[in-house]
Image: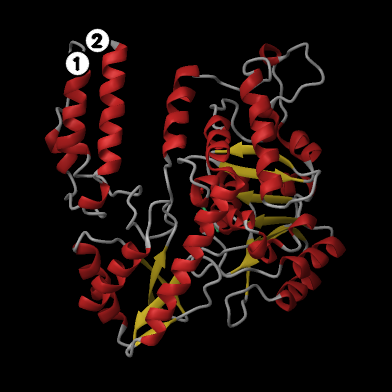
Amino acid sequence: MSDFRQDGAAALEWVAGYLEGMRERPVLSRAAPGNVRRALPAEPPERGEPFEAILRDLDEVIVPATTHWNHPRFFAYFAITGSKPGILAELMSAAFNVNAMLWRTGPAATELEELALDWLRQLLGLPEGFHGHIEDTASTSTLAALAVARELRPDGVIACSEHAHSSVDKAAKLLGLTVCKLAVDDEFRLLPEALEKLLARERIAAVVATVGTTSTTSVDPVAAIAGLCERAGAWLHVDAAYAGSSAVCPELRWALEGVERADSLVVNPHKWLFTPVDCSALFTRRPEDFRRTFSLVPEYLRTSEEEVTNLMDYGPALGRRFRALKLWTVIRSYGREGLQELIREHVRLAQLFATWVEAEAGWEVEAPHPFSVVCFRRDASDEENESLLERVNATGEVYLSHTRLRERFVLRLAIGHAATTEEDVARAWDVLRAA
Ligand SMILES: *Cc1c(COP(=O)(O)O)cnc(C)c1O
């Protein structure tokens, strides 16, 4: 092993240079399949190599074959940010290498997770009484919530709108549950009447309402859905993986109206709260039901502390890395005001982009855009829109993705990187028009 301080300084220098040079790189990797495998030895080295050799391969092989999610002109899927405070916290977290399965095996990691999630609860304007813990992804959070719902009502089905995220289907598949998809209104929001009808003929274990759907960021009417769930005794899980973070801004809290009545709620700080992947916050008003579902304590994990939280009791994984450190660091570094400023700016930029699209002949906005995602298309065939998107992404200037709405191919621009400026968004619009 070579000198840790020297290699560490070189690593930090490398990271700083990588971040600084971001705008010069093509957002979407131009690598062909197999490039990386061909460029690297197929067999492991016999003797340890110097860290410099690894840094060289990062530059020569890894960077060119990376699609740069940390690029300010990444506008595909949901744009995210590995912020600098978050990156540094990941370094510390690796140094601790804590496995916080039990309070005893990670007192600080356990208590910081409870604290950071309580800070997040307050930032989002959620009432007291919501218990929060961290899972790796929203997929796992939803799986965990639906597992609890199944424990309470094993013979029930899962209901969600046809615009709910595919992680609901995957969770149901893993849990052996059936999913009933409900119709949406003309703004892609779950129709409560459709849920009411389903409740009349099916026993429902859980309803998943989405705040910020993946295609259009539409918001299901959570309060109305909560009323129906309460009457039927069904679990209400709210998937706000992306849009939940917007509630940091009071003027956007309308989207979480009714969430205080949900049994569980997932918000991903790794989506729109500047925390590096992976960090998904799972809140519940029913922590005791989570413990009943997940607590399984073999002899070798028994400890004498009684009044402590053992986070392994709240989800599917036993081993838990110290993810709270990066969330806590990000919240401290930006503060409520800093987070609000960024989210407001992203919403402003998306609204501005939508006005450009609307003002241009031959282009159309395809869905309401309450947050930082705009769905739009050329007034042309699906094939033309699809090939337009290919040409735009091939420039390397920007990266956008697509969805399908009312059977039509639709382009999607998602703003969410902390360094994205109005100029970056204007560049996207220029590239789109030029293509
Ligand atoms: C992104 C997203 C997910 C999946 O998130 P992962 O953390 O990648 O599992 C689930 N639901 C919604 C609404 C999303 O936007």
Q: Position of residue 71 (x, y in %)?
A: 32, 51
Dividing the picture into quarters, in which one does residue 255 lie? bottom right
**Left or right of residue 356: residue 268:** right
- The answer for how far apart the CA atoms under marks 1 and 2 are is 7 Å
Q: Is residue 435 visible?
A: no
Q: Where does the C terminus fall, quadrant-wise?
A: bottom left
Q: Secondary structure at mark 2?
A: loop
Marks counted in the figure total 2
From the image, tell me which residue sits under label 1: 50
Q: Which residue is mark 2?
A: 2
Residues at discs 1 and 2 in contact (Cβ within 8 Å): yes
Which of the marked residues, 1 or 2, is nearer the chain's N terminus? 2
| Quarter where residue 211 is shown | bottom right
| Residue 292: image location, x then y, percent | 78, 35
116 and 77: which is toward the camera: 116
Question: Which residue is at 65% across, 64% downward?
Answer: 251
Q: Helix or strand or loop: what does disc 1 sit on?
A: loop
In the rendered view, tell whether residue 171 sits above or below residue 406.
above
Q: Is residue 324 above or below residue 1?
A: below
Q: Nearer the viewer, residue 229 or 220?
A: 220
Which residue: 77% across, 66% down? 223
User: Is residue 294 found left or right of 324 in the rendered image?
Assistant: right
Q: Residues within 10 Å of mark 1 (few under 14, many from 20)?
A: few
* Residue 118 seen from this side: yes
- Provide residue 103's location: percent of width, then percent of height: 68, 20
Q: Amino acid at mark 2?
A: Ser
Amino acid type of the residue that numbered disc 1 sits on in the rendered structure:
Pro
Q: Residues within 10 Å of mark 2 (few under 14, many from 20)?
A: few
**Structure colour scheme:** secondary structure
